[in-house]
Image (cartoon, rainbow, N blue to C red):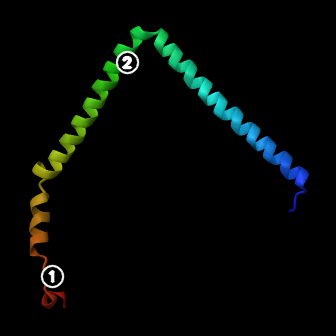
């Protein structure tokens, strides 16, 4: 479908207009959100504390999972023994 140059120009104008409106809305929304956060400064401390505790719990759970996989997994010895039995010797390939 070939568009005339007028149609193409109108389409580009509408596309640019919508893009500017969306980016403008995003900037204004973030500015208003920042302004509200600064006005409600007494809420920032508890919110940061909650986020910090949640993040610390998440990191702790990841460390526990990794430690279990490395140290306490009953199948890890079997896997290590199986890998030790493997050889790159071409005689064992056949």
Q: How many angstroms separate mark 1 from mark 2 (CA)? A: 56 Å
Q: Nearer the viewer, residue 82 or 35?
A: 35
Is residue 65 left or right of 37 when viewed as pictured?
left
Q: Residues within 10 Å of mark 2 (few under 14, many from 20)?
A: few
Residue 39 sits above or below residue 31 on the image: above
Identify the secondary structure beneath mark 1.
loop
Residue marked by disc 1? 88
Looking at marks 1 and 2 on the same chain, the residue that comes earlier in the sequence is marked by: 2
Is residue 77 left or right of 24 when viewed as pictured?
left
Residue 12 sits above or below residue 35 on the image: below
Q: Point out residue 78 in the picture as x, y percentages from the top left corner.
A: 11, 64
Residue 4 sits above or below residue 32 on the image: below
Q: Point out residue 61 in the picture as x, y percentages from the top left corner.
A: 23, 37
Name the image quarter holding residue 14: top right
Q: Point out residue 88 in the picture as x, y percentages from the top left corner.
A: 15, 82
Residue marked by disc 2? 47
């Amino acid at each position: 479908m070939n568009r005339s140059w007028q149609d193409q120009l109108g389409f580009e104008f509408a596309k640019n207009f919508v893009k500017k409106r969306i980016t403008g809305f995003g900037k204004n929304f973030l500015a208003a959100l920042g302004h509200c956060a600064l006005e409600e400064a007494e809420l920032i401390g508890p919110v940061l504390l909650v986020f910090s505790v949640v993040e610390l719990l998440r990191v702790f759970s990841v460390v526990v999972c990794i430690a279990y996989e490395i140290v306490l997994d009953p199948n890890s010895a079997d896997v290590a023994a199986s890998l030790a039995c493997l050889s790159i010797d071409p005689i064992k390939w056949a």
